[in-house]
Amino acid sequence: MQISVTGHHIDITDSLRNYVEGKFERLERHFDNVTNVHVILGVEKLRKKAEATIKISGAKVFADAVDEDMYAAIDALTDKLDRQILKHKEKFKNHRIGENRRTLDQAAIEP
């Protein structure tokens, strides 16, 4: 998994980069097919914003979070992405099961 972290009106320190990488390792545990992650951290007046785009097999997942603390925004962002990836994984799994079930049903009907 490749993680790129960029800043918008903010300097990305080593501690911020390490924190982001640590949080995104949790997402990779749920779904192995995460290929590329692009995280943008930004500051707008008093609001800290974190947004990310994740490329996984078959889809792109996007989320953003705003908070007064950058670390809290990153936490909220990873929670949102975690829910979306689990939802995508369930859809992917159910689609595969349904596809196999249809072929088995067709095989049972045809002599």
Image (spheres, helix red, strand yellow):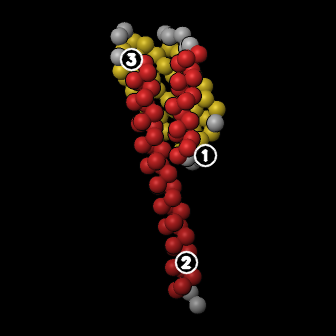
Of the two numbered discs 2 and 3 on the same chain, state the one appearing first in sequence.
3
**Mark nearer the viewer, 2 or 3:** 3
Residue furthest bottom as drawn: 111
* Image quadrant containing the N terminus: top right
Is label 2 in a helix, a strand or a loop? helix
Label 1, label 3: how far apart the Cα atoms are:
30 Å
Q: Residue at x 57, y 21 (%)?
A: 17
* Residue type, numbered disc 1: Asn
Residue 52 showing in the rendered view: yes
Q: Please tell me whether mark 1 sits on a helix, a strand or a loop.
A: loop
Q: Position of residue 44 (x, y in %)?
A: 39, 12
Foreground mark, 1 or 3?
3
Q: Which mark is residue 69?
A: 3
Q: Where does residue 76 sit, x and y in percent of width and height?
A: 40, 30
Between 55 and 90, the one lying in front of the other is 90
Neighbourhood count class around disc 1 (C-alpha, 10 Å): few under 14, some 14–19, many 20 upward: some
- The residue to which callout 1 is attached is 33
User: Do the residues bearing badges 1 and 3 touch, measured as CB atoms within 8 Å?
Assistant: no
Residue appearing at x 51%, y 73% in the figure? 102
Rendering quarter of residue 65: top left
Residue 66 is tagged as none
Position of 24 relative to 34 (above/below)? above
Q: Nearer the viewer, mark 1 or mark 2?
A: 1
Which residue carries the number 2 mark? 104
Query: Which of the two discs, 1 and 2, labels the residue nearer the N terminus?
Result: 1
Disc 2 to disc 3, C-alpha distance: 53 Å
| x 54%, y 62%: residue | 96
The residue under label 3 is which amino acid type?
Answer: Asp
